[in-house]
Amino acid sequence: MLVVEIKIVYSYYSTERVTPILLNEEELLGLNYDAFKWKIVNEIPHLSKTTNMATLRLNVLDGGYQVEISPAYFQHQIKEILEKNSTKSLEVFIPPGVASPPRKKNEY
């Protein structure tokens, strides 16, 4: 059972942050796109307060490029990236503007 380190890269209060999540490879490959998104939000509690799940997009680093993860091809994309990557790590990027701090009550 191989463990995959997933580094979640996101912006919070205008600061880039990285939160690592560890999953075994079988669990990761068994998730669908929506389950993967919920796993990330559950592991990083403040994202659930600042992120609209309907508009949340996820990108992965593949060959030096940020590639958007497709809900239709999620399992294929993840499997292909893990096969290419001997270190069994994955970087997931939440594009800026998706996760932003909550508004104050008087800001409308």
Image (cartoon, rainbow, N blue to C red):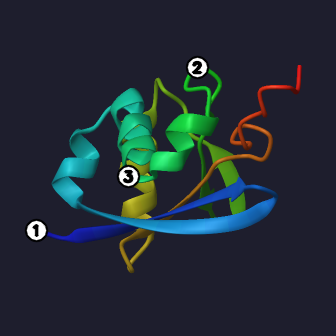
- Residue under numbered circle 1: 1
Residue situated furthest right in the rendering: 108
- Residue 74 coordinates in the image, percent (x, y): 43, 36
- Residue 81 coordinates in the image, percent (x, y): 46, 58
- Residue under numbered circle 3: 43
Q: Nearer the viewer, mark 1 or mark 2?
A: 2
Q: Residue at x 21, y 40 (%)?
A: 30
Q: Residue at x 73, y 43 (%)?
A: 101
Among the two numbered marks 3 and 1 on one chain, the one whose residue lies closer to the N terminus: 1
Among the two numbered marks 2 and 3 on one chain, the one whose residue lies closer to the N terminus: 3
In the image, 94 versus 66, the foreground residue is 94
Instruction: Report helix, strand or loop for mark 2.
Output: loop
Disc 2 to disc 3: CB gap under 8 Å: no
Q: Quadrant of residue 69?
A: top right
Q: Is residue 59 above or below residue 25?
A: above
Q: Is residue 71 above or below residue 8?
A: above
- Give how far apart the Cα atoms at labels 2 and 3 are: 18 Å
